[in-house]
Structures are given as C-alpha cells and as structure tokens.
Image: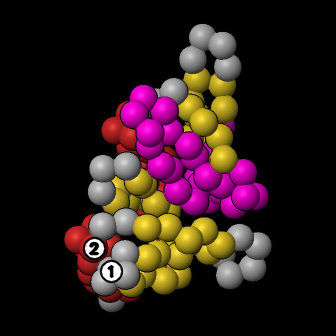
Amino acid sequence: MSEYLTISNTNAMIRFAAESMVYVVAYGNYSDIYTCDGKSHTVTLQLGEIEDLIDEQLHLTGEDFMRIGKSLIVNTCYVTYIHPTNRQMVLSDNHTFKYNLEASKEALRNLKEYLEKKKNK
C-alpha cells in the first residue's frame, strides 16, 4: 500500500502517493508539485513546510526526497542524469515522463555524491 503526502487547508485537501511525486519547486510562499502524470499542483506552502510534511508523513520513503538548493526537492528514485558542470539534471521513469531541470553546480555535485554512496548500500 502506498504512503501519501496529504496537504490540506480550510478549503481543500490534496493527497499525493509518494511514488507519484517527482519534484517540488518553490516560488516564495507557493510551491508546485510535479507528478508522474505530467501535471503540476500549486499549493500555498513554502518549500521548508513541504520538506517538514514529507519527513512527518512519508516515514521510510522520506529518505528518497532530497532538497536541492533553496527552491527544489527531488524524488531521488527518478534521477536518471546529473551533469553538475552544465547545471543539468533529468528526472524520468524512462517510460512515461521526463523532466529537465537546472540547479546549482554545488547542489548537483552533492546530489551526485549522495546517489553514488547510496548505490553501494
């Protein structure tokens, strides 16, 4: 059974299956959550608040989500390409979706090192 990230306010509630979340990008007090179906969902939360919700609600799968720089959280399960020098990253399931993103060289170097260490475990 899937674990869900639930975001609610006085007007609405939205739930995301952990494996459907590809990445989150923040714009001030708003964040867009991008999913495997190619859609984005805007929520009125800052990135740090979403990061906290992921830690609180997703428990074991929360380790799959990593904050990259000031405005990006990625699901590391979907990282298929990282090129720190060119500041490029691709998130994909190699079948149905592909997201091309940019991030700082330092953030991408850190992500690359993290994933290289993780593969050895």
Which type of secondary structure does the marked residue at label 2 adopt?
helix
Examine the rendered structure and indicate whether residue 52 appears above or below residue 13.
Answer: below
Q: Residue furthest front?
A: 86
Q: Is residue 27 left or right of residue 100?
A: left
- Tell me residue 67's x, y (percent): 35, 56
* Mark 2 burial class by Cα count in 10 Å: few <14, some 14-19, many 20+: some
Residue at left offset 52%, top offset 81%: 80
- Tell me residue 27's x, y (percent): 44, 39
- Tell me residue 1's x, y (percent): 68, 53
Residue at left offset 66%, top offset 55%: 35
- Asked whether residue 35 is drawn in magenta, I would say yes
Which type of secondary structure does the marked residue at label 1 adopt?
loop
Which kind of residue does numbered mark 2 sit on?
Lys
* Mark 1 burial class by Cα count in 10 Å: few <14, some 14-19, many 20+: some
- Asked whether residue 5 is drawn in magenta, I would say no
- Give residue 105's mark: 2
Examine the rendered structure and indicate whether residue 111 appears above or below residue 60.
Answer: below
Q: Which residue is mark 1?
A: 84
Magenta stretch bounds:
15-39
